[in-house]
């Protein structure tokens, strides 16, 4: 065995006599990260300044905000926003399913029509589509049902049928169907090809394969993504004001024209209500994603309440360790 400088072998190197209690009391100190603390401090200062500005700036007129927030006229506009969102979400999803099936069809005509629809509707701004539908009666004053290129069985006035609500729902549904089609198509393509082959080997009809095997598995991908799409739909309803439908935003705009001094409080009312609506949809999205994560992950993601309980438990344990030391 070689000797290190000083004439003492490694086997004979003295070991300091440290009491076991003192070793147990020692803790590993985490690595200092000054950049993280500086960034945290800057973020806290900016947030504090923003909150202070919201509270102290008289221009926001929080007293008028409280006056308008639950006024019946605002709640009526909120109800219209919810109705338009609900109708458009359901019709848009149904249209998206049909377009996705046409896109995946073996018929070249159906594939071409579906692709063209999705390409066109995703390219046209929603406000342009709504305004075009609002002036649709100038192009076609009457609509008829009958034999194509032949006699009509009956006709009706388009202006009477196309109310402001109908125009808003149809416009949003047509736009939503184009995006929902891609969500549904992506969900169907996410199903393993072996599922299709196994269903075909059993001799199951194509319709039965889709309804009972493919589509239920595709919902794991479709539902969370489409719920996320609803957040955009909620905000898109603010455009129906331009087709004379007084939704939440339209009501606030009308009241702002009547009471010019309350424009800012009314805009804050609209902002807070949209924050509430999108937050509720986000909560639904979380639980939907958690539900469809069953069987796909080893453990389900914790709920906010579970996260809070875990944080409190960790905090209590940390306090006890600090007190013991």
Image (cartoon, rainbow, N blue to C red):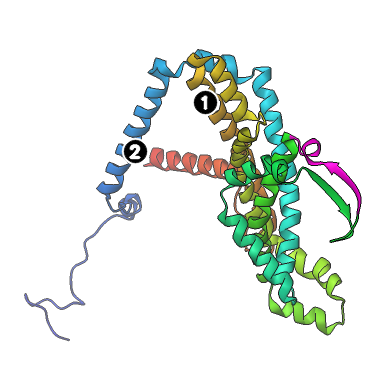
Q: Nearer the viewer, residue 25 or 43?
A: 43
Q: Is residue 259 magenta?
A: no
The image's mark for residue 267 is 1
- State how far apart marks 2 and 1 are (Cα): 26 Å
SS of the residue at dot 1?
helix
Q: Can you identify the residue that label 2 sits on?
A: 43
Q: Is residue 296 visible?
A: no
Residue at 71 percent of width and 76 percent of height: 108
Crowd tier of the residue under label 1, counting other residues whose Cα lies within 10 Å: few below 14, some 14–19, many 20 or above: some
The answer to which image quadrant residue 45 occupies is top left
Image location (x, y in percent) of residue 297: 62, 63
SS of the residue at dot 2?
helix
The answer to which image quadrant residue 106 occupies is bottom right
Residue at 64 percent of width and 44 percent of height: 132
Q: Is 105 positioned to the left or the right of 25 in the image?
A: right
Give the mark toward the camera: 2 or 1: 1
Identify the magenta region: 152-163
């Amino acid at each position: 065995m070689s000797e290190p400088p000083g004439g003492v072998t490694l086997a004979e190197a003295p070991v300091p006599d440290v009491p076991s209690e003192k070793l147990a009391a020692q803790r590993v100190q985490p690595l200092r990260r000054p950049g993280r603390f500086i960034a945290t401090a800057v973020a806290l200062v900016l947030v504090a300044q923003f909150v202070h500005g919201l509270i102290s700036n008289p221009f926001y007129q929080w007293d008028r905000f409280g006056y308008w927030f639950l006024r019946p006229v605002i709640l009526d506009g909120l109800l219209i926003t919810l109705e338009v969102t609900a109708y458009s979400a359901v019709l848009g999803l149904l249209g998206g399913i049909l377009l996705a099936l046409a896109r995946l069809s073996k018929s070249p005509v159906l594939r071409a029509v579906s692709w063209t629809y999705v390409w066109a509707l995703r390219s046209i701004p929603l406000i342009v589509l709504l305004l075009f539908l609002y002036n649709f009666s100038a192009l076609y004053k009457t609509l008829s049902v009958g034999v194509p290129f032949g006699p009509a069985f009956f006709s009706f006035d388009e202006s009477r049928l196309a109310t402001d609500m109908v125009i808003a729902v149809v416009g949003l549904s047509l736009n939503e169907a184009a995006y929902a089609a891609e969500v549904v198509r992506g969900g169907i393509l996410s199903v393993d090809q072996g599922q299709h082959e196994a269903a075909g080997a059993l001799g199951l009809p194509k319709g039965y394969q889709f309804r009972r095997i493919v589509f239920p598995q595709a919902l794991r991908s479709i539902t969370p993504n489409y719920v996320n799409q609803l957040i955009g739909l909620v905000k898109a309803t603010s455009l129906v004001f331009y087709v004379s439908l007084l939704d939440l935003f339209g009501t606030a705009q009308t009241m702002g024209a009547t009471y010019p001094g309350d424009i800012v409080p009314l805009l804050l009312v609209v902002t807070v209500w949209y924050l509430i609506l999108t937050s509720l949809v986000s909560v639904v999205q979380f639980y939907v994603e958690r539900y469809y994560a069953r069987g796909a992950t080893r453990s389900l993601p914790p709920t906010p309440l579970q996260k809070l309980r875990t944080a409190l438990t960790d905090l209590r344990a940390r306090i006890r360790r600090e007190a013991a030391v």
